[in-house]
Image (tube, rainbow, N blue to C red):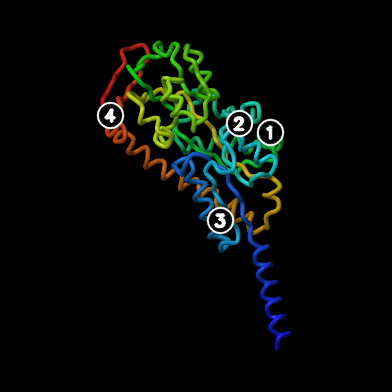
Protein backbone atom coordinates (compact mmCIF):
# COMPACT_ATOMS: atom_id res chain seq x y z
CA UNK A 1 0.00 0.00 0.00
CA UNK A 2 2.83 2.32 0.90
CA UNK A 3 4.48 1.63 -2.46
CA UNK A 4 1.25 2.43 -4.31
CA UNK A 5 0.81 5.71 -2.44
CA UNK A 6 4.42 6.67 -3.13
CA UNK A 7 3.98 5.96 -6.82
CA UNK A 8 0.76 8.01 -6.89
CA UNK A 9 2.45 10.96 -5.24
CA UNK A 10 5.33 10.74 -7.71
CA UNK A 11 2.99 10.68 -10.71
CA UNK A 12 1.00 13.63 -9.33
CA UNK A 13 4.17 15.60 -8.76
CA UNK A 14 5.34 14.80 -12.27
CA UNK A 15 2.07 16.12 -13.75
CA UNK A 16 2.40 19.27 -11.63
CA UNK A 17 5.93 19.85 -12.91
CA UNK A 18 4.84 19.31 -16.50
CA UNK A 19 1.96 21.76 -16.02
CA UNK A 20 4.29 24.30 -14.50
CA UNK A 21 6.80 23.92 -17.33
CA UNK A 22 4.08 24.39 -19.92
CA UNK A 23 3.08 27.81 -18.61
CA UNK A 24 4.75 30.80 -20.27
CA UNK A 25 5.28 34.03 -18.35
CA UNK A 26 6.70 37.18 -19.85
CA UNK A 27 7.90 40.20 -17.90
CA UNK A 28 6.92 43.55 -19.41
CA UNK A 29 8.80 46.76 -18.58
CA UNK A 30 6.92 50.07 -18.70
CA UNK A 31 7.15 53.11 -16.41
CA UNK A 32 5.13 55.63 -14.42
CA UNK A 33 1.72 54.24 -13.53
CA UNK A 34 -1.18 52.71 -15.42
CA UNK A 35 -2.61 55.41 -17.70
CA UNK A 36 -4.00 55.97 -21.20
CA UNK A 37 -0.49 55.49 -22.59
CA UNK A 38 -0.31 51.90 -21.31
CA UNK A 39 -3.89 50.75 -21.82
CA UNK A 40 -3.05 48.73 -24.95
CA UNK A 41 -0.38 46.83 -23.02
CA UNK A 42 -2.86 46.07 -20.25
CA UNK A 43 -5.46 44.96 -22.81
CA UNK A 44 -2.90 42.83 -24.63
CA UNK A 45 -2.11 41.00 -21.38
CA UNK A 46 -5.79 40.41 -20.76
CA UNK A 47 -6.44 39.06 -24.27
CA UNK A 48 -3.38 36.79 -24.36
CA UNK A 49 -4.33 35.23 -21.04
CA UNK A 50 -7.91 34.69 -22.19
CA UNK A 51 -6.92 33.13 -25.50
CA UNK A 52 -4.51 30.68 -23.86
CA UNK A 53 -6.64 29.90 -20.80
CA UNK A 54 -3.98 31.43 -18.58
CA UNK A 55 -1.11 29.39 -20.03
CA UNK A 56 0.60 32.54 -21.40
CA UNK A 57 0.69 35.59 -19.15
CA UNK A 58 2.25 39.04 -19.33
CA UNK A 59 3.46 40.42 -16.00
CA UNK A 60 3.48 44.20 -16.37
CA UNK A 61 5.92 46.15 -14.20
CA UNK A 62 5.72 49.93 -13.85
CA UNK A 63 9.35 50.86 -13.27
CA UNK A 64 10.31 47.75 -11.33
CA UNK A 65 12.41 46.16 -14.07
CA UNK A 66 14.26 49.03 -15.70
CA UNK A 67 14.50 52.77 -16.15
CA UNK A 68 12.55 54.03 -19.16
CA UNK A 69 15.70 55.09 -21.02
CA UNK A 70 17.15 51.59 -20.54
CA UNK A 71 14.24 49.47 -21.71
CA UNK A 72 15.73 48.82 -25.15
CA UNK A 73 18.98 47.72 -23.52
CA UNK A 74 17.02 45.37 -21.27
CA UNK A 75 15.30 43.82 -24.29
CA UNK A 76 18.67 43.41 -25.99
CA UNK A 77 20.13 41.28 -23.19
CA UNK A 78 16.90 39.42 -22.46
CA UNK A 79 16.38 40.96 -19.02
CA UNK A 80 12.64 40.95 -19.83
CA UNK A 81 10.58 39.83 -22.80
CA UNK A 82 8.53 42.93 -23.67
CA UNK A 83 8.99 46.66 -23.17
CA UNK A 84 7.78 50.09 -24.17
CA UNK A 85 10.22 52.89 -24.99
CA UNK A 86 10.26 56.25 -26.74
CA UNK A 87 12.47 56.80 -29.77
CA UNK A 88 13.51 60.28 -28.66
CA UNK A 89 15.13 58.95 -25.50
CA UNK A 90 18.04 57.52 -27.51
CA UNK A 91 17.95 58.58 -31.16
CA UNK A 92 21.29 56.91 -31.91
CA UNK A 93 19.90 53.49 -30.94
CA UNK A 94 16.84 53.62 -33.20
CA UNK A 95 17.46 56.15 -35.98
CA UNK A 96 14.89 54.73 -38.42
CA UNK A 97 11.82 55.23 -36.24
CA UNK A 98 12.85 58.73 -35.19
CA UNK A 99 11.40 59.82 -38.54
CA UNK A 100 8.04 59.50 -36.78
CA UNK A 101 9.11 62.21 -34.32
CA UNK A 102 9.87 64.83 -36.94
CA UNK A 103 7.88 68.01 -36.28
CA UNK A 104 4.89 69.13 -38.34
CA UNK A 105 4.32 65.84 -40.18
CA UNK A 106 0.64 66.60 -40.63
CA UNK A 107 -0.61 63.52 -38.78
CA UNK A 108 -3.88 64.73 -37.32
CA UNK A 109 -5.61 61.83 -35.56
CA UNK A 110 -4.67 58.87 -33.40
CA UNK A 111 -5.90 56.53 -36.13
CA UNK A 112 -3.53 58.19 -38.61
CA UNK A 113 -0.73 57.90 -36.06
CA UNK A 114 -1.32 54.14 -35.81
CA UNK A 115 -1.34 53.69 -39.59
CA UNK A 116 1.82 55.74 -40.18
CA UNK A 117 3.71 54.14 -37.30
CA UNK A 118 2.88 50.57 -38.28
CA UNK A 119 3.81 51.31 -41.90
CA UNK A 120 7.26 52.41 -40.71
CA UNK A 121 7.55 49.46 -38.32
CA UNK A 122 6.79 47.11 -41.20
CA UNK A 123 9.63 48.48 -43.32
CA UNK A 124 12.69 46.28 -43.69
CA UNK A 125 15.04 49.09 -42.65
CA UNK A 126 13.23 49.66 -39.36
CA UNK A 127 13.14 45.96 -38.63
CA UNK A 128 16.87 45.60 -39.28
CA UNK A 129 17.55 48.65 -37.15
CA UNK A 130 15.74 47.20 -34.11
CA UNK A 131 17.14 43.72 -34.76
CA UNK A 132 20.51 45.10 -33.62
CA UNK A 133 18.95 45.16 -30.15
CA UNK A 134 17.35 41.73 -30.53
CA UNK A 135 14.01 43.55 -30.63
CA UNK A 136 10.91 42.92 -32.71
CA UNK A 137 8.48 45.82 -33.18
CA UNK A 138 5.03 44.76 -32.00
CA UNK A 139 2.77 47.83 -31.83
CA UNK A 140 2.80 51.58 -31.44
CA UNK A 141 1.55 53.73 -28.56
CA UNK A 142 -0.30 56.45 -30.50
CA UNK A 143 -0.35 59.88 -28.96
CA UNK A 144 -1.95 63.13 -30.10
CA UNK A 145 0.03 66.20 -31.00
CA UNK A 146 2.03 67.55 -28.09
CA UNK A 147 1.25 70.89 -26.50
CA UNK A 148 2.95 72.69 -23.66
CA UNK A 149 2.00 73.74 -20.17
CA UNK A 150 3.86 76.54 -18.51
CA UNK A 151 4.14 78.73 -15.45
CA UNK A 152 3.84 82.49 -15.15
CA UNK A 153 2.53 84.72 -17.91
CA UNK A 154 1.35 82.80 -20.97
CA UNK A 155 3.74 82.74 -23.89
CA UNK A 156 1.09 83.13 -26.52
CA UNK A 157 3.22 83.97 -29.53
CA UNK A 158 6.07 81.99 -31.07
CA UNK A 159 8.37 85.01 -30.74
CA UNK A 160 7.93 84.74 -26.96
CA UNK A 161 9.48 81.25 -26.96
CA UNK A 162 12.97 82.75 -27.16
CA UNK A 163 15.04 81.54 -24.18
CA UNK A 164 12.06 79.53 -22.87
CA UNK A 165 13.28 76.39 -21.10
CA UNK A 166 11.14 73.52 -22.30
CA UNK A 167 11.07 69.81 -21.60
CA UNK A 168 10.99 68.42 -25.15
CA UNK A 169 12.68 65.47 -26.81
CA UNK A 170 13.55 64.40 -30.35
CA UNK A 171 12.28 66.39 -33.29
CA UNK A 172 10.00 68.45 -31.07
CA UNK A 173 13.02 69.65 -29.15
CA UNK A 174 14.72 70.65 -32.40
CA UNK A 175 11.63 72.58 -33.47
CA UNK A 176 11.71 74.57 -30.23
CA UNK A 177 15.44 75.23 -30.69
CA UNK A 178 14.72 76.67 -34.12
CA UNK A 179 12.63 79.46 -32.55
CA UNK A 180 15.13 80.22 -29.80
CA UNK A 181 13.81 78.04 -26.97
CA UNK A 182 16.12 75.89 -24.86
CA UNK A 183 14.98 72.25 -24.85
CA UNK A 184 16.00 69.67 -22.28
CA UNK A 185 15.32 65.96 -22.70
CA UNK A 186 14.50 64.90 -19.16
CA UNK A 187 12.33 61.79 -19.08
CA UNK A 188 8.61 61.84 -18.44
CA UNK A 189 9.09 60.70 -14.86
CA UNK A 190 11.52 63.58 -14.23
CA UNK A 191 9.39 66.30 -15.83
CA UNK A 192 7.39 67.33 -12.75
CA UNK A 193 10.50 67.78 -10.62
CA UNK A 194 12.18 69.73 -13.42
CA UNK A 195 9.18 72.04 -13.55
CA UNK A 196 8.91 72.34 -9.78
CA UNK A 197 12.60 73.16 -9.34
CA UNK A 198 12.64 75.68 -12.18
CA UNK A 199 14.94 73.66 -14.43
CA UNK A 200 12.28 74.16 -17.11
CA UNK A 201 9.57 76.78 -17.54
CA UNK A 202 7.38 74.61 -19.72
CA UNK A 203 6.77 70.93 -20.50
CA UNK A 204 5.71 69.45 -23.84
CA UNK A 205 3.51 66.37 -23.44
CA UNK A 206 0.38 64.77 -24.77
CA UNK A 207 -2.69 65.27 -22.59
CA UNK A 208 -2.52 61.96 -20.73
CA UNK A 209 1.07 62.62 -19.65
CA UNK A 210 0.27 66.10 -18.29
CA UNK A 211 -2.26 64.33 -16.08
CA UNK A 212 -0.26 61.22 -15.23
CA UNK A 213 2.97 63.01 -14.31
CA UNK A 214 1.33 65.97 -12.57
CA UNK A 215 2.65 68.78 -14.75
CA UNK A 216 -0.90 70.06 -15.24
CA UNK A 217 -1.04 70.65 -11.48
CA UNK A 218 1.76 73.22 -11.70
CA UNK A 219 0.51 74.83 -14.90
CA UNK A 220 -0.87 78.34 -15.31
CA UNK A 221 -1.50 77.95 -19.05
CA UNK A 222 -1.68 75.42 -21.85
CA UNK A 223 -1.29 75.86 -25.62
CA UNK A 224 -4.35 74.56 -27.45
CA UNK A 225 -3.02 74.58 -30.99
CA UNK A 226 0.79 74.59 -31.06
CA UNK A 227 0.84 70.96 -32.32
CA UNK A 228 4.59 70.67 -33.08
CA UNK A 229 4.56 66.90 -33.39
CA UNK A 230 4.52 63.93 -31.08
CA UNK A 231 6.80 61.25 -29.68
CA UNK A 232 6.80 57.71 -31.04
CA UNK A 233 6.87 55.02 -28.39
CA UNK A 234 6.73 51.44 -29.68
CA UNK A 235 6.16 48.24 -27.75
CA UNK A 236 8.80 45.68 -28.63
CA UNK A 237 9.48 42.08 -27.75
CA UNK A 238 12.73 40.19 -27.35
CA UNK A 239 13.23 38.27 -30.60
CA UNK A 240 14.50 35.10 -28.94
CA UNK A 241 11.53 35.02 -26.55
CA UNK A 242 9.12 35.58 -29.43
CA UNK A 243 10.60 32.76 -31.48
CA UNK A 244 10.50 30.44 -28.46
CA UNK A 245 6.71 30.77 -28.19
CA UNK A 246 4.54 27.91 -29.31
CA UNK A 247 2.45 28.45 -32.44
CA UNK A 248 -0.68 28.92 -30.31
CA UNK A 249 1.03 31.41 -28.01
CA UNK A 250 2.43 33.40 -30.93
CA UNK A 251 -0.98 33.48 -32.57
CA UNK A 252 -2.58 34.63 -29.32
CA UNK A 253 -0.09 37.48 -29.08
CA UNK A 254 -0.14 38.61 -32.71
CA UNK A 255 -3.91 38.35 -33.09
CA UNK A 256 -4.48 40.53 -30.02
CA UNK A 257 -2.59 43.60 -31.24
CA UNK A 258 -5.41 45.15 -33.28
CA UNK A 259 -7.95 44.72 -30.50
CA UNK A 260 -5.52 46.13 -27.94
CA UNK A 261 -4.95 49.20 -30.14
CA UNK A 262 -8.71 49.64 -30.64
CA UNK A 263 -9.18 49.59 -26.86
CA UNK A 264 -6.41 52.17 -26.49
CA UNK A 265 -8.04 54.48 -29.05
CA UNK A 266 -11.44 54.28 -27.35
CA UNK A 267 -9.91 54.99 -23.95
CA UNK A 268 -7.79 57.91 -25.19
CA UNK A 269 -10.74 59.36 -27.08
CA UNK A 270 -12.69 59.56 -23.83
CA UNK A 271 -9.80 61.45 -22.21
CA UNK A 272 -9.61 63.97 -25.05
CA UNK A 273 -13.37 64.53 -24.88
CA UNK A 274 -13.13 65.74 -21.30
CA UNK A 275 -9.85 67.70 -21.59
CA UNK A 276 -11.48 71.16 -21.50
CA UNK A 277 -13.27 70.14 -18.31
CA UNK A 278 -9.93 69.15 -16.79
CA UNK A 279 -8.45 72.55 -17.64
CA UNK A 280 -11.42 74.32 -16.11
CA UNK A 281 -11.25 72.27 -12.93
CA UNK A 282 -7.56 73.08 -12.51
CA UNK A 283 -7.90 76.75 -13.45
CA UNK A 284 -5.51 76.52 -16.39
CA UNK A 285 -5.71 79.19 -19.10
CA UNK A 286 -6.09 77.82 -22.63
CA UNK A 287 -3.90 79.77 -25.04
CA UNK A 288 -4.53 79.77 -28.79
CA UNK A 289 -1.52 80.92 -30.77
CA UNK A 290 -2.37 82.83 -33.94
CA UNK A 291 0.60 83.28 -36.19
CA UNK A 292 0.99 86.83 -37.43
CA UNK A 293 -2.00 88.08 -35.45
CA UNK A 294 -2.89 88.85 -31.87
CA UNK A 295 -3.06 85.80 -29.64
CA UNK A 296 -6.14 84.65 -27.83
CA UNK A 297 -6.29 83.68 -24.16
CA UNK A 298 -9.29 81.89 -22.84
CA UNK A 299 -10.08 80.78 -19.33
CA UNK A 300 -11.89 77.48 -19.73
Q: Quick one: label 2 or label 1, which is nearer the N terminus?
A: 2
Q: Residue furthest front?
A: 2
Which of the two residues, 69 or 64, is positioned nearer the viewer here? Answer: 64
Against 287, residue 129 (above or below) is below
Q: Quick one: label 1 or label 3, which is nearer the N terminus?
A: 3
Secondary element at image label 4: loop
Against 224, residue 119 (above or below) is below
Q: Residues within 10 Å of mark 1 (few under 14, many from 20)?
A: some
Q: Quick one: label 4 or label 2, which is nearer the N terminus?
A: 2
What is the spatial separation of the Cα atoms under label 2 and label 1, in whole angstroms? Answer: 9 Å
Q: Which residue is mark 2?
A: 97
Q: Quick one: label 1 or label 4, which is nearer the N terminus?
A: 1
Quarter-of-image position of residue 151: top left
The percent position of residue 265, horizontal first and vertical second, equals: 44, 43
Secondary element at image label 3: helix
Camera-near label (1 vs 4) is: 4
Residue at the image position 42 percent from the left and 14 percent from the top: 161
Camera-near label (2 vs 3) is: 3
Q: Quadrant of the N terminus?
A: bottom right
Against 154, residue 61 (above or below) is below
Q: Residues within 10 Å of mark 3 (few under 14, many from 20)?
A: many
What is the spatial separation of the Cα atoms under label 2 and label 3, in whole angstroms? Answer: 27 Å
Which of the two residues, 105 or 267, is positioned nearer the viewer here? Answer: 267
Q: Which mark is residue 11?
A: none
Q: Are marks 1 and 3 in contact (CB under 8 Å)?
A: no
Secondary element at image label 1: helix
Residue at the image position 36 percent from the left and 11 percent from the top: 292
Q: Which residue is mark 3?
A: 48
Q: Which residue is mark 1?
A: 129
Amino acid sequence: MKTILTAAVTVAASFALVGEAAATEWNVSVWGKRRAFTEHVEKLAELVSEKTDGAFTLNISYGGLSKNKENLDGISIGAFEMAQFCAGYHRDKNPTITVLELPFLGVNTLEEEVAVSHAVYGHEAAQKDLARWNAKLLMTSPMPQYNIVGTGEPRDAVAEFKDMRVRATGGIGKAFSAVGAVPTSVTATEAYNAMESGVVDTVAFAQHAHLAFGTINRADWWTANLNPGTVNCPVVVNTDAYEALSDDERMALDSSVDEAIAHYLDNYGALLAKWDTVLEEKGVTKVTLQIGRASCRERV
